[in-house]
């Protein structure tokens, strides 16, 4: 009896996952039609899984949270999701020592225009977040996202992970009502690098609200609200962040840190270096400790300390302000080679610690 079941299940496995190769240690499976059971089974049986051109039904997460250690997860062709108003995410990935990547023809087509109404996460249609990844000792690369309904890529509780060559293209949202389409949201993570990525969107290029040792390197951000830390509060800590060799163009803000008024937490050991700004509409550099306050008053419960800016250069629109700072309780800032020009909006800066090497 057990033997028959074993044989039967082997036969089912072969049919369902079309193993493309098999060795003593690894089995490859290809999923070319959505089926939740097959996808779950593939994660049990296979350490190389290809998801090829599937249509995910409405209101369902493509659930890849049971990957075995060491799995290679490959996306090929276009993945689409049927329309529904719900919070998502559309894909969830969890694992240790996994490699996740797309082939040359890979696309996650979010078909954001079906949801976009100019209101993002603030109202109107309920829009699904796109992808949430929780991985350790992993490598994620060469994934293409198009037209995310709202937030694109959430890096949640990831450790020792390299994310690179990601393309997030929400250009269509500029004219069709895309809003809150943050590219990378990072929380609760430690030692994550995001590099060589390209973003066209309508909210933060990176937004980090908790975690340590984040490296955001060689990325291109267009249309965004800037490369942001925050908003930080609720006791969260953000520390040891390096943002280096990035370009921010046609965006509301460039360099941005926001901490929540009346809350606690900390932001420390932050470096932004070699950042080029072009056509910034609101603030080239904005550091604010008053987020969420009505009167535009900063509070000191989320102090920003050991904050270095080095070689931040480029242009703002004339309606913008080049630099705006409103903080309290800040310490040990070191700013050098700040060459942001073009903005003629007059703002006053408050709370820049003495010895920063900059005033405005
Ligand atoms: C299977 O794993 C063993 C030990 O981990 C390794 O020596 C062997 O080369 C592997 N075989 C294949 C076909 O990958
Ligand atoms: C940090 O993550 C990288 C992968 O991006 C890894 O190579 C490195 O060993 C990690 N560092 C530590 C201290 O674990
Ligand atoms: C990160 O965000 C997720 C989703 O919002 C939440 O469930 C989780 O508790 C957060 N983790 C930390 C450490 O803040
Ligand atoms: C300033 O920050 C320190 C921590 O560095 C904190 O103990 C203190 O309460 C803060 N002060 C104010 C006025 O919030």
Image (cartoon, rainbow, N blue to C red):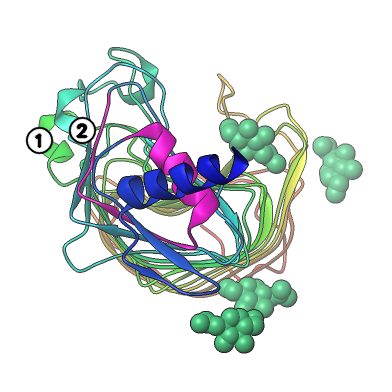
Residue 56 picture quarter: top left
Query: Could you tell me which residue is drawn at 56 percent across and 25 percent down?
Result: 292
- Relative side of 348 to 290, left or right: left
The residue range painted magenta reads: 35-57
Front residue of 227/61: it is 61
Residue 175 is labelled as: 1
Q: Earlier in the sequence, mark 2 or mark 1?
A: 2
Front residue of 213/355: it is 213
Residue 135 picture quarter: bottom right
Front residue of 52/317: it is 52
* 274 part of magenta stretch: no
Query: Could you tell me which residue is drawn at 41 percent across and 42 percent down?
Result: 39
Q: Which residue is mark 2?
A: 112
- Relative side of 315 to 155, left or right: left
- Relative side of 171 to 50, left or right: left
Residue 213 visible? The answer is yes
Within-10-Å neighbours for mark 2: few <14, some 14–19, many 20+: many
């Amino acid at each position: 009896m057990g033997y028959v079941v074993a044989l039967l299940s082997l036969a089912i496995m072969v049919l369902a996952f079309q193993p493309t190769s098999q060795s003593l240690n690894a089995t490859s499976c290809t999923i070319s039609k959505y089926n939740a059971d097959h996808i779950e089974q593939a994660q049990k049986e296979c350490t190389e899984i290809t998801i090829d051109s599937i249509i995910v039904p409405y209101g369902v997460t493509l659930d890849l949270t049971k990957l075995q250690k060491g799995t290679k997860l490959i996306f090929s062709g276009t993945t689409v999701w049927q329309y529904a108003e719900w919070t998502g995410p559309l894909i969830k990935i969890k694992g240790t020592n996994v490699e996740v990547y797309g082939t040359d023809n890979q696309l996650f087509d979010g078909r954001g225009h079906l949801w976009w109404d100019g209101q993002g996460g603030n109202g109107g249609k309920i829009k699904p977040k796109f992808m949430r990844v929780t991985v350790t000792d992993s490598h994620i690369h060469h994934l293409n996202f198009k037209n995310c309904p709202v937030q694109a890529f959430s890096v949640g509780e990831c450790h020792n992970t390299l994310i690179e060559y990601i393309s997030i293209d929400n250009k269509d949202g500029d004219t069709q009502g895309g809003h809150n389409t943050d590219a990378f949201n990072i929380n609760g993570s430690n030692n994550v690098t995001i590099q060589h990525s390209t973003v066209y969107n309508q909210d933060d290029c990176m937004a980090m609200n908790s975690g340590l040792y984040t490296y955001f390197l060689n990325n291109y951000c267009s249309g965004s609200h800037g490369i942001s830390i925050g908003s930080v509060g609720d006791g969260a800590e953000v520390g040891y962040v390096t943002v280096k060799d990035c370009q921010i163009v046609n965006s509301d803000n460039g360099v941005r840190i926001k901490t929540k008024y009346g809350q606690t937490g900390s932001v420390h050991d932050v470096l932004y270096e070699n950042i080029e700004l072009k056509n910034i509409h609101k603030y080239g550099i904005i550091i604010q400790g008053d987020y969420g306050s009505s009167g535009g008053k900063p509070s000191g419960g989320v102090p920003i300390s050991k904050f270095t800016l080095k070689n931040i250069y480029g242009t703002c629109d004339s309606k913008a302000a080049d630099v705006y700072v409103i903080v309290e309780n800040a310490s040990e800032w070191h700013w050098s080679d700040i060459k942001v020009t073009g903005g003629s909006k007059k703002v006053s800066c408050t709370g820049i610690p003495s010895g920063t090497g900059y005033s405005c």
